[in-house]
Image: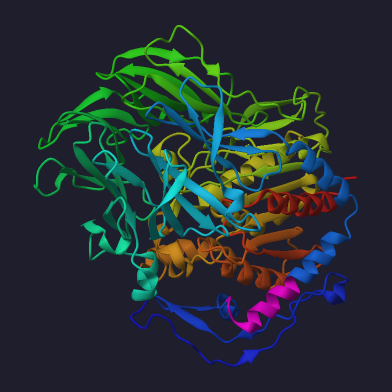
Amino acid sequence: MNKNKYLLIGVLAIMTLASCASTGALTYPLSKKVDVKDDYHGQVVADPYRWLEEADSQEVKEWIAAQNELTGTYLAKIPGRKAMKERLTAIWQYDAYSVPKQAGGRLFFFKQSGLQNQPLFMMQEDGSSEAEVLIDANTLSKDGTVEIASVFPNDDGRYVAYATSGSGSDWQTIYIYDVEKRANTTDRLDWCKFSDVAWADGSSGFYYNRYDDPKNVSKEHMTGGNKVWYHALGTLQAEDRLIYEEENDLNMIYDPMVTDDGRYLVIHIFNGTDPENKVIVKDLQTDAPFVTLFDKADAMYQVVANEGHKFILHSNLNAPKGRIIAKELGSNEISELVPEQTAVLDGVKRSKDRLVAAYMEDAAHRLKVFALDGRLIDKVALPGLGSISGLKTSFKESTVYFGFESFLSPRTVYRFDSGNLASQPAVVWPINLPVDTSAFETKQYFVTSKDGTRVPIFVTAKKDLAKNGKNPAILYGYGGFNINLTPFFKVHRLYWLEQGGVYVVANLRGGTEYGEEWHKAGMLGNKQNVFDDFIAAAKYLIAEKFTSPEKLAINGGSNGGLLVTATLLQAPELFGAAVAQVPVTDMLRYHRFTVGRFWVGEYGNAEENSEHFKFMYAYSPLHNVPSSIKAPPTLITTADTDDRVVPAHSFKFAATLQAAQKGKNPVLLRIDSKAGHGHGKPTDKQIEEMVDIYSFIMKNLKMP
């Protein structure tokens, strides 16, 4: 953008009725238009709903209330909602476990039983079958909206640092739990976001990353200026010692860790959400300053372990699908332990004198065990086609824990001995799912995108599915930020399958299902590839008679919400319904809000770069709604406390699409309260949301 960041041409508010009432469609709430225009590199762009960015204004609150009233009234009239809620409630009632962390002969994990709003934080002494509750997150708030977002036990298992988050916010507070006393210490650490804890000096303290007190900094610094601190146990946060910061760059995010031997502090330095990073190291046994292990953010570098001065890393340097390398501190030489393979290296953990590595092959996981020198020891047999969700072990333990899930099986925790692979992985906690899934199956297919790229999709449906074009189907995607969509379980999906629905997940470019090249093919100027892949998947499902346009719904959240809103505009004729959850829609201004600045490496910056503006403006959903459109029935969901993708994205897009919509297809906006971006959402809120989403889809796909 030019030095005059934006040009306001007039401030007169023009009241308009965003309504299609004359055609027999819904009458939408009044959405005024303001004469606001921005100048992007000589291109003037109107932003008539800029006022909806002020979520705390009384005017916007009244508009929100009117939108919710319209949506609530529409949804309440859909028959079968009571029975739907009862069935969802019934199938939700099973025990779910996280993959445990080992420390001092203890296992620390989460367990969520049935309809509990939040999981219980549990501990089990090694070798014991009895587990006890350490913290019940359901007691942290009256309405169940406070979650324990992460836990970090110290090496001997005496203390656990845990971070809480309220109403789905990214902001967290860290507390310390004394396992021996079964109580919190007096420690409290505020202003944390995306924070890690790295225990050091036995139990005396730890390193962590956080931001400055928002009350003492500018609005820009509230979500910028991450720093690494040292906190001594039993002291006030004001006494914490600043360890590292890059003062001139507010976009940096730090990931501190202490090596297994306690000798080194390692800090991974990221520019926002970019996967490439730098690595610096400090010898904690001396007063020497940090030294550089990798000084250029030219690849992904993740320290896995160290053997004295030698560091073992997972990296994609000169290997887009990943490899395991080693580097001596102070040396420029890199040695290769495990070379790049045809499958994508998705993660590596050390287990005593073994390296346990998860690989992706056509978007499903495999597990291998290597010696520390890179020799392949063996492959670990997995239960089937699915995903490893969580891989936990330590340099002191040969026992490896991992979660495994599929589209039809919830995460089940397994364990095996990395030093003795003769035995198969054993189930730690059996899962008793209240649904017989034997009638369903998942198959993988490959579709051809617009440019000829082969794109995998997973189709889950009844085994005897008739390909007659009459099956209702939901097509889900994400396509960004190098996030994989390997098979994953959602209990509410079983309800959809029971109703005869088909559920499809597309592995779009933008993820890393096929390595960093697959990611780069769906970011920045290549973002249109993601939408083309999604459209190709829809066309395949229709051509192969899995479904038909009037029976096909699309769904995605966050970056996947961007996918849905862009795609419904580019190919509205392909879809019978669209549900965009917490979507990013304003690609010209997204970086101005909360943590949006961290996404510039993925999306670009339309203000600062004229070339970025060209490709971002070309697909930005908010700016590509035509003056008149027959969009498919569309439900947009957001939350008033979402501080990751601010609700203004949903507000402005909904107002714009409502004003342009012709015909009877509804365009509805659902604004939840105290729900944030979705993480930590209480079970009762999840069920309510899914009743609304499924009833909307089923009505508009004309399901019984």
- Whether residue 361 is visible to the viewer of this picture, yes or no, is no
**Residue 568 at x, y percent in the picture:** 67, 56
Residue 66 lies in the magenta-colored region: yes
Question: Is 206 located above or below residue 634 in the figure?
Answer: above
Q: x%, y% of residue 166?
A: 54, 59
Q: Please name the residue shown 23% across and 60% down the image.
A: 246
Q: Looking at the picture, does residue 387 appear above or below residue 258?
A: above
**What colouring does the structure picture have?**
rainbow
Q: Which residues are magenta?
A: 55-67
Q: Position of residue 463 (x, y in %)?
A: 77, 24
Q: Residue, x 30% and y 50% (percent of image)?
A: 233
Q: Quadrant of residue 72?
A: bottom right
Where is 176 relative to 612, above or below?
above
Name the residue: 62% across, 42% down.
536
Which residue is farthest front? 181
Quadrant containing the N terminus is: bottom left
Residue 469 magenta-highlighted: no
Locate residue 150 relative to residue 201 in the image: left or right. Answer: right
Horizontal and vertical percent for residue 207?
A: 28, 49
Residue farthest along the top direction in this orientation? 422
Magenta segment's dominant SS is helix
Residue 447 lies in quadrant: top right
Q: Quadrant of the C terminus?
A: top right
Q: Is residue 506 visible?
A: yes
Please give the count of numbered marks on the rendered protein: 0
